[in-house]
Image: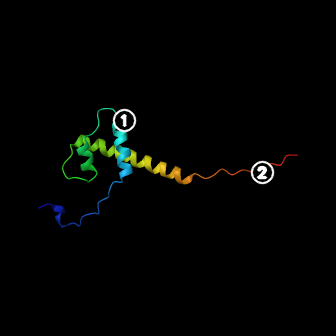
Amino acid sequence: MCICDDEEADERVLIEDTVLARARILDAARGGGSVADEAWAIFAGKTGGSVAWPDYQRMQTIYESAANLEKRLAHMRRERRPLRRRAIAVG
């Protein structure tokens, strides 16, 4: 029996597919070989299993970078406004 058995379980945070796809792209572009597809499925919570610690550290770092990038891109898409044109008096 674990000490945490009496504690209530936290809600799981689901990984958005767009962030996961961006993380996979970043992983492929990063040197040192990509993490296996099975490990990404476990990390995303789509399947059960265990992941080697170095792979987990790599996926966590890449996922955080992808999530931050996705936030910035979403902010940029939202903030685009049409240019205002001012009338200049000629005379």
The percent position of residue 15, horizontal first and vertical second, equals 33, 54
Quick check: 70 left or right of 62? right
Residues at marks 1 and 2, CA–CA distance in whole angstroms: 48 Å
Q: Residue furthest right?
A: 91
Circle 2 Cα neighbour tier, 10 Å, few/some/many (<14 / 14–19 / ≥20): few
Residue shown at 48% from the left, 52% from the top = 74
The percent position of residue 18, horizontal first and vertical second, equals 39, 50
Secondary structure of the residue carrying tag 2 is loop
Question: What amino acid type should be assigned to the residue bearing mark 1?
Answer: Ala
Circle 1 Cα neighbour tier, 10 Å, few/some/many (<14 / 14–19 / ≥20): few
Quick check: 65 left or right of 56? right
Of 61 and 6, the residue lying toward us: 61
Q: Residue furthest left?
A: 1
Question: What amino acid type should be assigned to the residue bearing mark 2?
Answer: Ala
Residue shown at 29% from the left, 60% from the top = 12
Q: Which residue is mark 1?
A: 29
Q: Which residue is mark 2?
A: 87
Quick check: 90 left or right of 15? right
Residue shown at 35% from the left, 52% from the top = 17
Of 89 and 4, the residue lying toward us: 89
Q: Quadrant of residue 3?
A: bottom left
The percent position of residue 55, horizontal first and vertical second, equals 25, 41
Q: Quadrant of residue 7?
A: bottom left
